[in-house]
């Protein structure tokens, strides 16, 4: 993961900033989605004033190291039953650091590097998820996990990859149900 810190109204903004390193810093609302509530503070001063503003509203935020070299893009790996069944790269529109499709980003199929594949699989495994959407940034230090989604959407990834991911999920469910079903002689008529 990129270096990350949570605020807790401790007024220790300097300590938080030290943990992250230097500006620019990404500030996220704990409950944002579709890129809304994800901000980029270009300077330490800007970061501190944004943190103060949210503290005064009693809203907790996440501070995160800005991965500049990700270039406004992220990767979504879709995992079903311990396998990556599809992956896409989402590129934000020109001048936008957020790659969300809802913010005007574009998605394209991508072949994951071995490191990206194993990072995504490990992330899903450590969350105990058979089905997951793992979002990663491509950084100079290798793939970094941004988020693990337990109910990832299908539309964007199916369109970008051309893979019938819903079909793969149904197959997995059918196999799991078949494995768990009782032997015929134990089923009551
Ligand atoms: N630390 C970071 N460094 C560089 N870019 C980032 C960083 N964090 C987020 N981004 C960019 O901003 C986008 C939105 O951030 P994130 O996925 O964390 O929030 P969200 O999309 O609003 O939440 P959710 O994925 O739960 O809907 C990412 O897809 C990525 O392109
Ligand atoms: Mg996201």
Image: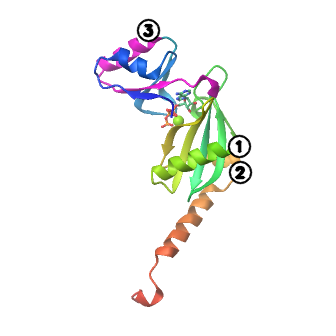
Q: Are marks 3 and 1 in contact (CB under 8 Å)?
A: no
Residue pointed to by mark 2: 162
Residue pointed to by mark 3: 45
Per the rendering, the mark at residue 157 is: none
x, y (%) of residue 169? 57, 60
Residue pointed to by mark 1: 109
x, y (%) of residue 141? 60, 31
Residue at 57 percent across and 44 percent down: it is: 119
Instruction: Indicate left or right for 30 with 150 as reference.
Output: left
The answer to if 62 sits in the magenta stretch is: yes
Query: Is residue 152 in view from this perspective?
Result: no
Distance between the alpha carbons at the discs numbered 1 and 2: 9 Å
Queried on whether the Cβ of the residue with tag 1 lies below 8 angstroms from ligand 1, the answer reads no
Residue lying at the far top of the rendered structure:
45
**Part of the protein shown in magenta:** 44-71
In this rendering, the count of numbered labels is 3
**Does 164 appear above or below 53?**
below
């Amino acid at each position: 993961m990129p270096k990350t810190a949570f605020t807790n109204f401790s007024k220790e903004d300097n300590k938080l900033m030290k943990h992250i390193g230097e500006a620019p810093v990404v500030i996220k609302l704990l409950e944002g989605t579709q890129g809304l509530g994800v901000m980029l503070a270009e300077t330490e001063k800007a970061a501190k004033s944004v943190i103060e503003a949210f503290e005064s509203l009693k809203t907790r935020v996440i501070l995160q190291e800005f991965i500049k070299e990700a270039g406004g893009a992220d990767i979504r790996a879709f995992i079903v039953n311990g396998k990556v069944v599809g992956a896409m790269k989402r590129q934000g529109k020109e001048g936008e650091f957020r790659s969300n499709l809802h913010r005007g980003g574009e998605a394209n199929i991508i072949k994951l590097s071995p490191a990206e594949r194993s990072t995504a699989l490990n992330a899903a495994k450590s969350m105990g998820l058979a089905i997951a959407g793992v979002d990663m940034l491509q950084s100079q230090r290798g793939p970094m996990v941004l988020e693990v989604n337990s109910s990832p959407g299908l539309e964007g990834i199916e369109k970008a990859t051309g893979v019938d991911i819903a079909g793969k999920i149904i197959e997995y469910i059918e196999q799991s149900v078949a494995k768990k079903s009782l032997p015929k002689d134990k089923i009551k008529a």
